[in-house]
Amino acid sequence: SMESRKPIAFGVLTTDTVEQALDRAGLKHGNKGWEAAQTVMEWFQPPSPQSPAEPLAWDEAFLDRAESGEGGEALWFWESPTPFVVLGYGQQAAVETQSETCEHHGVPILRRCSGGGAVLQGPGCWNYGLVLRIPEAGPLASITGANAWIMEKNRALLANLLSQRVTVEGHTDLAIEGRKFSGNAQRRKRNHL
């Protein structure tokens, strides 16, 4: 871990029965696998943001850090303490927002480093940031492949957690019964996305 600058956690459940395994997976004795994973993930858990601009800056900073070789792959989650509008990298505020209304209500208009559409967010809207190394081959080697791979991971996890059918709509949206509840965008550099 010290040489590669990547956190490592090792957690093994040694059980004699399926019942013991289930108990240690969260039924009676806490989720031991999650506890092992948390020891690594906490290295990447940023502080609670004071403004929505902070985590948008983290997105770019974590990507730049990985690209420079100082950091590595990371996953973080955040929720804004206040409402805001976020624009995709190439969007124009005058076209995509009602800037006078936003200004009147004290809602900042911000820009993220990735693409995607304009979104009104605030408390209760969960966001995630993800930095992955781009390999020479495989699904992450292309924009389309990376979108498909990441969206399928998100879809499967959320379908399991929500006990509902979740579908990938288009390339980067998730929906339940045809209603979009998640949009995703990516920014790619030479070695990381």
Image (cartoon, helix red, strand yellow):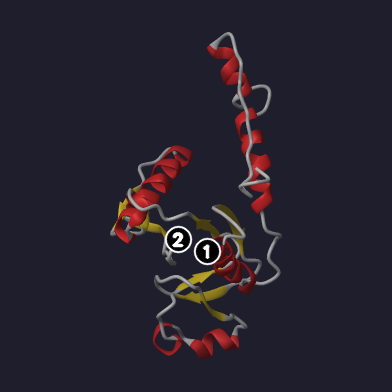
Residue 146 place in picture, x, y as percent:
36, 55
Q: Earlier in the sequence, mark 1 or mark 2?
A: 1
Label 1: element kind: helix
Residue closer to the observer: 140 or 179:
140
Task: Tell me the quarter of the picture where residue 50 sits.
Answer: bottom right
Residue 191: give its label: 2
- Count every numbered label the image shows and give the total: 2
Answer whether labels 1 and 2 touch (C-beta < 8 Å).
yes
Residue 27: give its label: none
Residue drawn where x is 56% and y is 52% of the image: 75
Q: Is residue 165 above or below residue 90?
A: above
**Distance CA(mark 1)–CA(mark 2):** 6 Å
Residue 150 place in picture, x, y as percent:
40, 51
Label 2: element kind: loop
Residue 110 shown left or right of residue 40 in the figure: left
Regarding residue 176, the answer to whether it shows in the image is no
Residue 72 shown left or right of residue 89 in the figure: right
Residue drawn where x is 64% and y is 44% of the image: 7
Residue drawn where x is 67% and y is 28% of the image: 30
Task: Tell me the quarter of the picture where residue 60 sits.
Answer: bottom right
Residue closer to the observer: 30 or 133:
133
Q: Is residue 80 above or below residue 93?
A: above
Residue 11 place in picture, x, y as percent:
63, 28
Q: Is residue 159 above or below residue 69?
A: above
Residue holding disc 1 = 67
Residue closer to the observer: 64 or 179:
64
Q: Few, some or many C-alpha atoms within 10 Å of disc 2 (few <14, some 14-19, many ≥20)?
A: some
Q: Few, some or many C-alpha atoms within 10 Å of disc 1 (few <14, some 14-19, many ≥20)?
A: many
Q: Amino acid at mark 2?
A: Asn
Q: Amino acid at mark 1?
A: Glu
Quarter of the picture holding the C terminus: bottom left
Residue 170 shown left or right of residue 125 in the figure: left
